[in-house]
Every structure is written in structure tokens, then in C-alpha cells.
């Protein structure tokens, strides 16, 4: 869902002030990056400073738009600084390019964008890295990558069993989690799911437990910020018509689940926040969302994503050898996550 990109700064150096196609192409590229990409740069800001310096020489009507898009990328935490001192490609005399080529060889982005002599140099230096395409910026709009950006921005719809757990992880979770510092999950049904079980022995149902456990495992495995990261789950619990004893039991079960997850993964930054709902008068948002400090997506079926044992067996899959399948689900981008966060924040904690 978030594609890593390396941009060689020379693509921003104006070629012809009288020909608007160049500036329009770069602005279109930046707009695509803002939808579904992250830009990898060095921690010394060599690449970032070079990008900004090049744009400063643009004609004003194009410069303001490009600068605004770069600021938006930065504010959305889509410009990611990575270690590059030990991986500089010294074959090039251009210092920003040394960082770009080194980063591309190490982090294997989905694309490297270059122009003219830098394009030729990048192709030579990355000739052994077959899985990273080097695209001349003049050909960006007709590239496979541009098509991928367009498809990504439209979201994804999966039929029941279309994908395996590993496919979902590779295509959705890892791209969302690997550069994220803060994960927030909103699904009112996780807490609600224990209400009907209060008469016997209450617990978080396995289908939610399995998905949340899986998501946290992936985050801790792939995130570059796992040591300082935060993983939060927000859900609701309807207290309508329940006595104090049952509400207290629900609180105990939910707090125990939070503690169990913290202990299992040695990760105290896993937080479960339950909001008090009272029938229709006071409810959490209906949509189910996964929101990071970089992007927000709507997951239409919520966090009940994995086939259970019965479904696997009925479809003739082996529970040990075969991958879990993913339930039918629609995933789309959410433009303003603050609306969801603010609405949930207004509800009292259970």
C-alpha cells in the first residue's frame, strides 16, 4: 500500500524554462507519491537539501506547487531517512547520487527515478539489482510504476479466499508497517464481541485474537521503529441494560487481553482502549480503520480477516501445511483520519 521510491535529485533541475511539460510531469509525480509512496533519503539530508535547492530555481507558478507537495510529503512522514554512510556508491562523483544508489542497492525500492546522465549512471551501477527498475522521468507517466500508483489509490477488493495470509502480509501489512512509528486500529466489534459471552465465560473471540496477534507480530518483525513504536487498538463496549457486575467482568476480560499481549510480545506499548457505548445514543464509528502516522485505510469487514479451522477443512486445506486464507474484504484509502480519531476521542473510556 505504501511503495518505497528513490529519487535522484537531478530530476528537479530545470531543463527548459519555456517548456511546461517538464514541470507538469514532476508535479504529477509528486502528487502520485503523496497518494501511495514514501521517498527514501539519507539521514544527513544530502538528498533532501538537493531536492529543495533544485526546486528553488523553478518558475514561480510551478515552484510553489512543487514546494507545497514536498512539505505535505514531509508532514505526512513520507520522507524516510535511512542509514547510508556505509553504503555510498563512490563510483559517482555526485554526492547525492552516491547516497541514492547506495540506498537503492540496500533497501530495494520499487523504483529509482532519474534523468539524462544520472539515468545512464544509475542503470550501470544498479545493473546487478534486477528487481529495481530505473525509470527516466520523461517516461514516468507511461511506466508500470505509474499504473501501480493509480491502481493502489483506488484500493483493493478481495473475494473470499483470494489471498493467503502471506500475500496479505507482503502486499498490505509490511508496506504499511515497515516505516510507521504509530499504529492505531479502530474496530468497535472487538469489544462488543464479548457481550454475549458474559453469561458464561467471557473472552476475546479467536477470530479477533488471531488477527490482532498476527498484525502485532508483523509490526514487530518489520518495523524500523519497533523499539519506540506504539500499537493501539480502539474498540467499543455497549453497557446498555447491563448491571455493574457484568460491566466489571467485561473490563477485566479486556484488560487481561491487553496484559496478555504485552507479556507475550514483551511489548508494553500495545494498548487496548475500550470506549463506552450506550445503544444508539452513544456509539463508536461504524467503519473499521487502520491508521498509522503516514496513512489511513478503511478495512470494510474489520479485523476478522483469517479463515477459521472449519473453513480451511471444508475447502480441503491442510491446517498444518497450507496457508490461512483471507476472508472477503475491501480496502480503501481514508483522506482525513483526524475525523475518526476525534470522534472516538469524544467517547468516555469504559
Image (spheres, grey):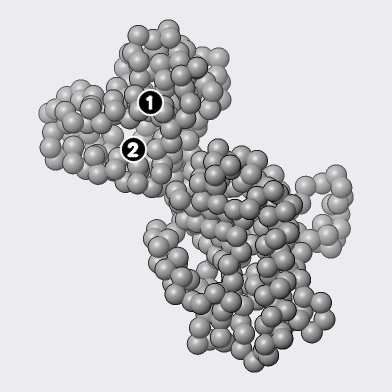
The numbered disc on residue 168 is none
Residue 3 screen position, x and y as percent:
48, 39
Q: Quadrant of residue 327?
A: bottom right
Asked whether 339 or 26 is in front, the reply is 339
Residue 65 screen position, x and y as percent:
21, 43
Say which residue label 2 marks: 29
Asked whether 86 or 251 is in front, the reply is 251
Residue 278 screen position, x and y as percent:
56, 86
The mark that comes first in sequence, 2 or 1, is 2
The answer for how far apart the CA atoms under marks 2 and 1 are is 24 Å
Q: Residue at x 59, y 53 (%)?
A: 269
Asked whether 227 or 216 is in front, the reply is 227
The numbered disc on residue 44 is 1
Residue 135 screen position, x and y as percent:
41, 25
Residue 314 in the figure: left or right of residue 219: right
Q: Quadrant of residue 79?
A: top left
Disc 1 is placed on an element classified as: loop
Q: Quadrant of residue 159?
A: bottom right
Amino acid at each position: 500500500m505504501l511503495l518505497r521510491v528513490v529519487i535522484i535529485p537531478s530530476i528537479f533541475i530545470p531543463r527548459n524554462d519555456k517548456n511546461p511539460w517538464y514541470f507538469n510531469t514532476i508535479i504529477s509525480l509528486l502528487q502520485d507519491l503523496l497518494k501511495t509512496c514514501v521517498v527514501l533519503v539519507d539521514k544527513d539530508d544530502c538528498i533532501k537539501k538537493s531536492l529543495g535547492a533544485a526546486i528553488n530555481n523553478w518558475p514561480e507558478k510551478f515552484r510553489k506547487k512543487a514546494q507545497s507537495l514536498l512539505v505535505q510529503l514531509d508532514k505526512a512522514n513520507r520522507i524516510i531517512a535511512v542509514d547510508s554512510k556505509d553504503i555510498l556508491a563512490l563510483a559517482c562523483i555526485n554526492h547525492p547520487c552516491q547516497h541514492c544508489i547506495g540506498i537503492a542497492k540496500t533497501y530495494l525500492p520499487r523504483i529509482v527515478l532519474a534523468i539524462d546522465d544520472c539515468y545512464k549512471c544509475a542503470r550501470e551501477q544498479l545493473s546487478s539489482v534486477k528487481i529495481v527498475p530505473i525509470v527516466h522521468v520523461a517516461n514516468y507517466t507511461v511506466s508500470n510504476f505509474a499504473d501501480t500508483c493509480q491502481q493502489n489509490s483506488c484500493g483493493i477488493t478481495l473475494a473470499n479466499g483470494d489471498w493467503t495470509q502471506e500475500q496479505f502480509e507482503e502486499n498490505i501489512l509490511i508496506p504499511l508497517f515497515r516505516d510507521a512509528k504509530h499504529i492505531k486500529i479502530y474496530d468497535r466489534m472487538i469489544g462488543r464481541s464479548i457481550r454475549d459471552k458474559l453469561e458464561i465465560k467471557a473472552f476475546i473471540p479467536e477470530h479477533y485474537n488471531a488477527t490482532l496477534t498476527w498484525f502485532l507480530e508483523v509490526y514487530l518483525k518489520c518495523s524500523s521503529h519497533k523499539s519506540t513504536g506504539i500499537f493501539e487498538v480502539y474498540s467499543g463496549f455497549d453497557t446498555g441494560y447491563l448491571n455493574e457486575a457484568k460491566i466489571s467482568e467485561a473490563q477485566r476480560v479486556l484488560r487481561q487481553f491487553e496484559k496478555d499481549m504485552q507479556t507475550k510480545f514483551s511489548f508494553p506499548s500495545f494498548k487496548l482502549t475500550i470506549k463506552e457505548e450506550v445503544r444508539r445514543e452513544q456509539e463508536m464509528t461504524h467503519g473499521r480503520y487502520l491508521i498509522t502516522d503516514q496513512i489511513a485505510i478503511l478495512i470494510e469487514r474489520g479485523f476478522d480477516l483469517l479463515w477459521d479451522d472449519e473453513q480451511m477443512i471444508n475447502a480441503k486445506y491442510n491446517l498444518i501445511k497450507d496457508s490461512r486464507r483471507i476472508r472477503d474484504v475491501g480496502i480503501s484509502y481514508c483522506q482525513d483520519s483526524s475525523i475518526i480519531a476525534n470522534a472516538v476521542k469524544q467517547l468516555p473510556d469504559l
